[in-house]
Amino acid sequence: MRARIFSEENRKWWTLVSVAFALFMIMLDNTVVNVALPSIQRDLGIGVSELEWVVTAYALSFAVLMLTGGKLADMYGRRRIFLVGLAVFTISSLFCGLAGSAEFLIAARVVQGVGAAFMMPATLSIIAATFPARERGAALGIWAGVSAMALALGPLVGGLITEEISWNWVFYINVPVGIVGLVAARLIISESRDTSKEQRLDVPGLVTSGVALFALVFALIEASTYGWSSSIIIGLFAAAAVFGVAFVVLELRARLPMFDMTLFRNSTFAGANVVALLVSLAMFGVFFFVSLYMQNVLGYSAVRAGASFLPMTLLIILVAPLAGKVSDRIGSRNLMASGMTLVATSLLLFAQLQPDSSYWVLLPPMIVGGIGMAITMTPMTAAALSAVPVDKAGVGSGMLNTFRQVGGAVGIALMGAILAAAASSSQADGATEVEAFMSGLHRALYVAAAIAFLAALVAAVTIRSHAAPDQAPGVADGVGGPDAEALPEAL
């Protein structure tokens, strides 16, 4: 019986189920935390900048260690590193729930990000190694749909848990899910790794990239506290620039770099990564501040705020798998460009929100944004990973998700900085606290819309036609063949 269930043909789909089930936890955690933010703020007595760190601490450690996680997966085994990451994420979730102060919670969120950084690239490289090229778009579309289901359920479940129990339990819920995921992955997933003879970690690259990103994010989040012209903020921006340049120079000269710059010779891979950066830059801050807007300005309960996001996330569930299949047939360029145009439109609609707006004003941007995200994200992954040889899939997926997570961390900090600056200016002119918040929110949303339009342009210019279904995996323009495009990612 077990032999029939885990035949070679069935095993790949059970592998997809196992991977998606474990990643359900990460996606659930993202949306659950957003809805719980006002309750965390009240319970721990923290300010908006500390609240931003609760989100960005996770995104930052996730981004900094993503490439390391991908490299470790290629070196020591993708299943092994996936299991390690899942265990770290599960244990740190328990400590997040136990947190009694902002400092403890932020520290636990950093560790959560470490676990996620080990899991995510291993997950995508497991899929890349398991499925043939002609099925990867569909497999990753299903992966994205399952992950989106967590996004859809997260706000509602988080709202119910926050109201009926406490915000701590939005983290505790990860523990049983993680345990089941560990058992399933251990039994089902086959081990795979990069078979190259020479392997090593790029410690200088890890250090320089980590310092650069931390300095940039810290400066953006704390600029309103210290002042944009203060010596500490100027020094942090300078440090971010210096260490960023040092990272690029080191990676160009390294014999075995963590960040393989040669992959960017392929315009599709380069374009997909830039789009991943820009879409996260535009959207992460929006989710953060729209959640605060609904609860702190409109007076929504946590449950109602969570339910308000359902149209967007349900559309992602329904449309993302279809987008993956369509990208296998027609390529990703038109889907990505159209999707980012819709995302930009949704941000402009969000910018029309007022202190007394009804839900009918919130609904159109939710619908437009949900469709736009769905037809962007899966084709974006399909466009990036098919340009990477399968034996480098861990590094390739790590690079893609690094851009996405960097965009998220910087996006929250950037939108927060714009909002804080505009709000301070409005309050100086005599505006009330709510009026000042709305002024800052509008300005941040207009900037986010411009970033999304830029992403649409990048997609239209850089993404090339999709690889033929029967083409060998990993053969792509600039990497091993003349006219390929990319494998798939997800949300």
Image: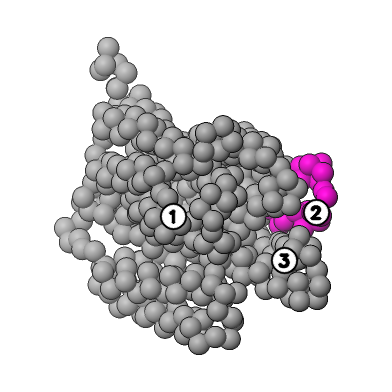
Q: Residue at x 32, y 43 (%)?
A: 91
**What quarter of the picture does the N terminus occupy?**
top left
Q: Residue at x 32, y 18 (%)?
A: 5
Give above or below for 294 relative to 271. above
- Mark 1 — residue? 101
Mark 3 or 1: in front is 1
Which span is picked out in magenta? 343-363
- Mark 3 — residue? 440
Give the mark, 1 or 2, whose residue is nearer the N terminus: 1
| Residue 341 drawn in magenta | no
Label 3 amino acid? Gly
- The image's mark for residue 355 is 2
Label 1 amino acid? Ser
The single residue placed furthest to the left in the displayed view is: 197
Q: Is residue 294 left or right of residue 12?
A: right
The single residue placed furthest to the top in the displayed view is: 1
Mark 1 or 2: in front is 1
| Residue 352 drawn in magenta | yes
Circle 2: element type:
loop
Residue 447 image position (x, y, % from top left): 69, 67
Q: Is residue 153 left or right of residue 269?
A: right
Give above or below for 94 relative to 292. above
Q: Residues within 10 Å of mark 2 (few under 14, many from 20)?
A: some
- Camera-side residue: 87 or 107? 107
Q: Residue at x 42, y 50 (%)?
A: 100
* Main SS, magenta residues: helix
Label 2 amino acid? Pro
Give the mark, 3 or 2, whose residue is nearer the N terminus: 2
Marks 3 and 1: CB-CB under 8 Å? no
